[in-house]
Image (cartoon, rainbow, N blue to C red):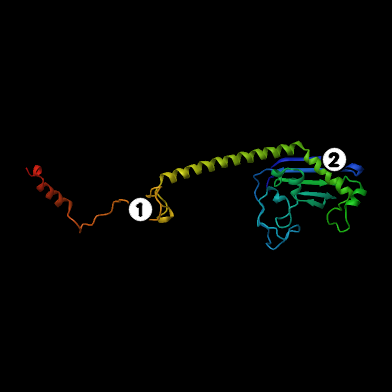
Amino acid sequence: MTTVSAQLDKRLDTALGEGYGTIAIRVVVLEKGLAAAPAPAAADQTPVDAQPDEALPETDKRPVSSFLEEPKRGRQCCVFLINGQRQHAWDNQFIVRDLELKYLRNRMIVVVDCDGLKPEAIAELMQGSRNQFYEGQVYDALASRVTATLKGDPDLRRLEEETEDEISSLQAGDEAVKAALDQLIEAHHDAAAHVDHGRSQPGDASRDEDSSGSLLQSKDVIVPGDFSVGVGARALYAARRCDDPIEAE
């Protein structure tokens, strides 16, 4: 059995306004290094909360994925329980948008136990179809209390700030490495020969800056000699010695 390591696991008991009763909130923040969840057994399963144009991954690499539904069955990481059964759920947009804890969105699980609510409040929340809670006055009070309790928790805020600082330091290190590599590449290009040929990478122009037109510019270059044409260097040197009086003496 795999041992789960959590950075935070705490329970928060709080009361709703208007005398609706009490709720118990359990929040868990998992360590970053947990293994990814395996691929789902059946590739043709469609998530119940999937959007028409949503891309569905084969594996879910979030640390919380092993504790939620399979990757292709949903993304809810905040669940509401009555008598131990899930009756309502929110996805991690609640963590990002309402709690402003975007760096914890893939490692955080919230379980809200609603058994402490009064029967009248539960009766208003439960619908005959049992398809999520009825969003009325009790629901608004419940959502507001859960958001306010978690948003004001100092431990969650501390973990968010620590994760943000860690990511910022990693990004700064990546920028430094990228700058060093760019400098090495530029130095290599300055010291290296042309990497392309012909018109792809022309050399220095021989035309004067003040000249105009498209006439070809000529320039002396060294070319290989043709031994079948002209006089050999040794014979030419011997002939010059014979013609020179000083050399002849």
- Residue neighbourhood size for the residue with mark 2, other residues' Cα within 10 Å, grouped as few (<14), some (14–19), many (≥20): some
User: Residue 129: x percent and y percent?
Assistant: 86, 59
Q: Who's the residue at 71% across and 46% down the image?
A: 105
**Can you identify the residue that label 1 sits on?**
217
Q: Which mark is residue 54?
A: none
Give the amino acid type for the residue marked by disc 1 in the picture.
Gln
- Residue neighbourhood size for the residue with mark 1, other residues' Cα within 10 Å, grouped as few (<14), some (14–19), many (≥20): few
Between 99 and 189, which is closer to the camera in this rendering?
Answer: 189
Provide the secondary structure element on which disc 1 rests.
loop
Evaluate if marks 1 and 2 touch, with contact meaning CB atoms under 8 Å apart. no
**Can you identify the residue that label 2 sits on?**
14
Q: Which residue lies furthest to the bottom in this view?
A: 44
Q: Residue furthest left?
A: 249
C-alpha separation, residue under disc 1 versus residue under disc 2 = 89 Å
Would you say residue 18 is visible in this rendering? yes
User: Residue 168: x percent and y percent?
Assistant: 63, 40
